[in-house]
Image (tube, rainbow, N blue to C red):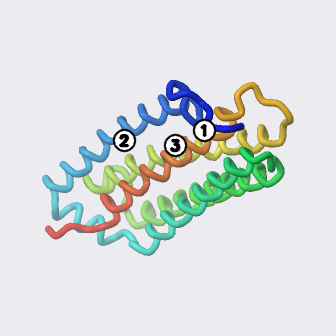
Amino acid sequence: MNAARRSWSDPPGGTLPWLIVLLELGTFSIVFVAISMLRRSEPKVFAAGTAALSQPFGLGLTLLLLTSGAAAASGVRAYRVGERRRSRARLLGAAGLGLGFVVVKLLDYAHHAARGHGLGADLFWDTYVLATGFHLLHVVVGVAVLGMAARAAGREQLADPETSIAGPALFWHMCDVVWFILWPLLFVGGKP
């Protein structure tokens, strides 16, 4: 598989994954703008909500996704040079780290819900749960497609190896990018 030899109309990762990623980034852009507007309209509510979040915890989630993204990229590189076994291991590692993110995020929701910080508590917590929940749904899908890519990496022949291997990694990197924007919007407090 050599992504560099693909035409501009068939980009690395394949056309369909790029269309999906662009659509999702457009959707998340609306979420980002809405959060920014809500932060401006209710600064005290957002400052109080942000103060209840742990910035080190948010950083830990960010590092978990970043490490997973690096493993996914390494898996794609390994596949492109014919190292299917290493590719499969790296893609499975990326999926495992993503699954770790899911578990930790669910524990985070439970922690905050026990303190009355959930849907219906106030505008910040509604925003936090809905925005990070929408992202979490994408992470779950990303874990599944990385698992499918890892399985595909072990096969001798694929109809379109670039889409089968690099496409899921592209989707996974979109999850990274979205979190890199959500994290400061939600975890870094503004002054009321």
Give the residue type that dot 2 points to.
Phe
**In whole angstroms, how far apart are the C-alphas of marks 3 and 1?**
28 Å
Give the residue type that dot 3 points to.
His
* Disc 2 element: helix
Residue nearer the viewer, 36 or 22: 22
84 over 110 or under it: above or below: above
Residue nearer the viewer, 92 or 162: 162
Q: Residue at x 52, y 48 (%)?
A: 173
Q: Earlier in the sequence, mark 3 or mark 1?
A: 1
Pointers 1 and 2 in contact (C-beta within 8 Å): no
133 over 62 or under it: above or below: above
- The quadrant the N terminus occupies is top right
Judged by depth in the image, the label closer to the viewer, 3 or 1, is: 1
Q: Position of residue 192 (x, y in %)?
A: 14, 68
The quarter of the displayed image where residue 181 is located: bottom left
1 over 129 or under it: above or below: above
* Disc 1 element: helix
Q: Earlier in the sequence, mark 2 or mark 3?
A: 2
* Disc 3 element: helix
Residue 167 visible in rendering:
no
Q: Residue at x 63, y 46 (%)?
A: 143
The quarter of the displayed image where residue 47 is located: bottom left
Taking 144 as reference, is 28 left or right?
left
- The residue wearing badge 2 is 28
Q: Earlier in the sequence, mark 1 or mark 2?
A: 1
- The residue wearing badge 1 is 4
